[in-house]
Amino acid sequence: MDVAVIVGLISFALIVGTYGTVIGAGGGFILIPGLVLLFDFEGVEAVGTGTVTLLAIGITGAINYDRAGLVHRHAAGWFAMGSVPAALLCAWFVADRIDADLFTSALGFVLIALAIFVVLAPHSTADDEEISEPRRSRLALGGLGVGVLSGTFAVGGGLLTVPQLTSVQKLRPHRAAATTSATAMMASLAGATGHTIAGNVVWSRAALLVAGAIVGSTLGARLAGRLPARAVLIGLAAGLIVAGASLLLAG
């Protein structure tokens, strides 16, 4: 493998891991299009290899956030009840059966739709009081939808989970981001298992991506909370639109 490719993969994963952990969205919406557009991955291989990388980001972020006491463990557990089986089944049976060109275009539309959702989604305010008891059915149902999306495309899980946790459990944004890291870890484990079974993971490149992602995720957990929420929201929506439009044009 070319040295430039090795350095590029590690550096790219480091950036994605840092930003994805700060915002609690994992970074799949940057990682997957980047692997397709910058490193010539096929769509389903980008998702399979990217899911392994997102698992590393999720594990590292969840451990650091949990040590800081920010993870709502009960909410994360009930959310995973829906997301884990859905992510496993979609990664195993659905993603590999979508035509490559159709997959790229569909992913582009999903990213733009997520940008609109991020801007319009309700967010908790300082006046909201956190709900300590998990709302089990609503969390599990929300996890089911997130699992379908993350298992098929490896994007959108965190972007949908954070607003759901802020609206359902009234978690503060940074606590919601921390809890999302825990749910993403479990959903990514299921998705990575499904994609491994389906043969969608390029392991030689996944190892490089994981190395960069672990460093980036550790750095991101330390930086979390230092950026203004509004700035993160605007940057997040802009990134989704750019990534989605790039995929649509490439397709």
Image: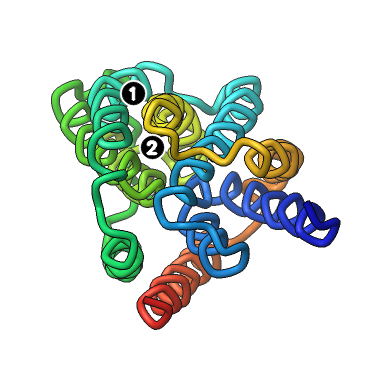
Please state which of residues 198 and 37 is positioned toward the viewer in this rendering.
198
Q: Pointer 2 and pointer 1: residues touching (CB < 8 Å)?
A: yes
Q: Is residue 17 left or right of residue 115?
A: right
Please state which of residues 211 and 185 is positioned toward the viewer in this rendering.
211
Q: Residue at x 51, y 63 (%)?
A: 36
Q: Amino acid at mark 2?
A: Leu
Indicate the secondary structure of the residue bearing disc 1: helix
Q: How much space separates mark 2 and mark 1, taking CA atoms?
A: 10 Å
Please state which of residues 166 and 3 is positioned toward the viewer in this rendering.
3
- Closer to the eye: label 2 or 1: 1
Mark 2 or mark 1: which comes first in sequence?
1
Q: Residue at x 46, y 64 (%)?
A: 233
Number of residues whose C-alpha sits closer than 10 Å to that of mark 2, classed few (under 14), some (14–19) or many (20 or more)? many
Quadrant assignment for the C terminus: bottom left
The percent position of residue 206, horizontal first and vertical second, equals: 63, 40
The residue tagged 2 is 171
Please state which of residues 223 and 62 is positioned toward the viewer in this rendering.
62
Identify whether 102 is placed above or below 142: below
Q: Residue furthest bottom?
A: 249
Identify whether 114 is placed above or below 226: below
Asked whether residue 127 is in view, the answer is: yes
Indicate the secondary structure of the residue bearing disc 2: loop
Q: Amino acid at mark 1?
A: Ala
The residue tagged 1 is 75
Q: Residue at x 61, y 36 (%)?
A: 203
The percent position of residue 98, horizontal first and vertical second, equals: 25, 53
Q: Residue at x 41, y 45 (%)?
A: 158
Q: Residue furthest right?
A: 3
The percent position of residue 149, horizontal first and vertical second, equals: 28, 46
